[in-house]
Amino acid sequence: MRKIGIFYAFWTREWDVDFFPFVEKVRRLGFDQLEINGGTFAIMPQAERDRLVREARARGISLSYGIGLTANHDVSSLDESVRRDGLSFMRTMIEHVGRAGGGMIGGTIHSSWPMTLPKGATDKRPYLDQSKKSMRELAKIAEDNSVILNVEVINRFEQFLINTCEEAVAYVEDIANPACRILLDTFHMNIEEDSIGGAIRRAGRHLAALHLGETNRKPPGLGRMPWQEIRAALDDIGFDGPLVMEPFVAPGGQIGRDIALWRELIPNPDYDRLAADAVVFVRKTLCA
């Protein structure tokens, strides 16, 4: 049975918040999984991490961890000191997730976010080489900590290194470690892929998780995403990983700026009702 999750930031305008209240919230709304900010989890006091993990276990909620590495932790940087700082930060995150029982860390774990090809550069291969150098080291650490590192395929307007599933497959096959897999996102696929179903089939066994959202980042079921096509492709590859919603609908705060939300997508939103309706839609459309 495919688990259904949601990213905590649907309800917040800042990345660094107290995740504890969201555990009971998502359970009550019908979810199986809560995705939190892996960067915040990495620097929380150990007592807070333990409290959060205990609450999730008590409520029967799985935790997953998302991160877009910042420029000072860019593991694809040509500046070796920056790359090493990124490795150190990721190691800390991986080890804390391991102590929490393991799980998935996904997002821009292979570079930084948001990021464009540096001015004056015309070839991204040197950055890709640095990224792979880092990932080979990180994947070994992840293996030792029961962690899966999911490289997210991000659209060209937010990142430059891996924009298509084809690029991601080449990347993880080069890393050749089962702890390094792929995270696809319907929002990004809608921008970059010729065929959303085709991209899912291309990922195949490498696909560990799927982020869900409509073409404008509304919750699933409120737009024109080809959900039947997505369902057919997931079934074709025998996908049994988590389906994690990552909707954003309200401007404001650092999240609104980073996601480029300059207007309310849904006037006067009832966030809990939107989430509850979306989980019913996803369970019926992609799981039943």
Image (cartoon, rainbow, N blue to C red):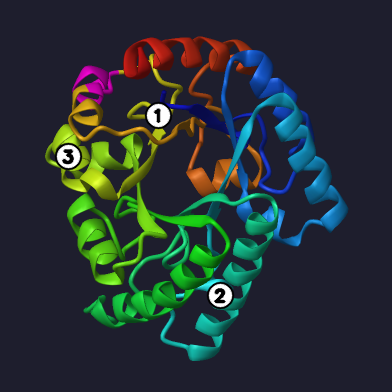
Q: Residue furthest bottom?
A: 80
Horizontally, is 124 left or right of 2 in the view?
Answer: left
Q: Is residue 230 magenta?
A: yes
Q: Amino acid at mark 3?
A: Arg
Decide which of tag 3 and tag 2 comes sooner along the chain: 2
Q: Is residue 47 magenta?
A: no
Rounded to the nearest angstrom, the CA distance separating label 3 from label 1 is 19 Å
Q: Nearer the viewer, residue 2 or 257?
A: 2
Rounded to the nearest angstrom, the CA distance separating label 3 from label 2 is 32 Å
Q: Is disc 2 in contact with disc 1, using a CB cutoff of under 8 Å?
A: no
Q: Is residue 115 above or below residue 21?
A: below
- Residue drawn at x 41%, y 72% as measured from the top left: 135
- Number of the label disc, if any, that sits on residue 221: none
Q: Which residue is mark 2?
A: 86
Question: Dividing the image into 4 quarters, which one contains the N terminus?
Answer: top left
Q: Residue furthest right?
A: 47
Q: Amino acid at mark 1?
A: Gly
Q: Nearer the viewer, residue 274 or 34?
A: 34
Q: Which residues are magenta?
A: 224-231
Image-quadrant location for residue 179 = bottom left
- Number of the label disc, if any, that sits on residue 213: 1
Q: Does residue 168 appear in the picture of this structure? A: yes
Question: Dividing the image into 4 quarters, which one contains the C terminus?
Answer: top left
Decide which of tag 2 and tag 1 comes sooner along the chain: 2
Q: Which residue is mark 3?
A: 201
